[in-house]
């Protein structure tokens, strides 16, 4: 069953920011898709068996903080 995790990621403002966050999130086990809305700073990760701590760590690895 696919599940989703939603985060607000302040500081994202351009395509480079979006690409960095998407790349790191897609490396996390179980993540199948990532949707990012730069206007609202919303990030949605979808997949199976998602680990909140791992997703937050991936966003931090990209240089941002998840709220």
Image (tube, grey):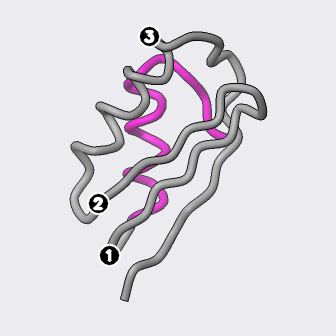
Q: CA distance from mark 2 to mark 1?
A: 8 Å
From this view, report whether residue 61 is shown above or below residue 5.
above
- Foreground: 41 or 61? 41
Pinpoint residue 9: horizontal percent, then vertical percent.
66, 32
Residue at the spot of label 2: 32
Q: For mark 2, does the 10 Å Cα neighbourhood hold few (<14), some (14 to 19), or many (20 or more) residues? A: some
Q: Residue at x 42, y 40 (%)?
A: 57
Q: Residue at x 48, y 23 (%)?
A: 18
Q: Which residue is mark 3?
A: 16
**In the picture, residue 67 is in which quadrant?**
top right
Local crowd at mark 3 within 10 Å, few (<14), some, or many (≥20)?
A: few
Query: Dot 1, crowdedness within 10 Å: few (<14), some or many (≥20)?
Result: few
Which sits earlier in the primary sequence, circle 3 or circle 1? 3
Sequence-wise, the earlier of marks 2 and 1 is 2
**Image position of 27 (left or right of 60):** left
Q: Is residue 14 above or below residue 1?
A: above
Question: Does 61 lie within the magenta span?
Answer: yes
Residues rendered magenta in the picture:
51-67
Disc 2 + disc 1, Cβ < 8 Å: yes
Residue 48 screen position, x and y as percent: 32, 75
The quarter of the rendered structure image containing the N terminus is bottom left
In the displayed structure image, the side of residue 33 where residue 60 appears, left or right? right
The residue labelled by disc 1 is 48
Dot 3 or dot 2: first in sequence order is 3
Residue toward you, 1 or 29: 1
């Amino acid at each position: 069953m696919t599940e989703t995790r939603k985060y607000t990621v302040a500081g994202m403002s351009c395509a480079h920011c979006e690409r960095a966050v998407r790349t790191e999130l897609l490396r996390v086990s179980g993540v199948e898709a990532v949707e990012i809305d730069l206007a609202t700073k919303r990030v949605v990760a979808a997949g199976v068996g998602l680990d909140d701590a791992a997703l937050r760590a991936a966003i931090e690895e990209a240089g941002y903080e998840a709220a």
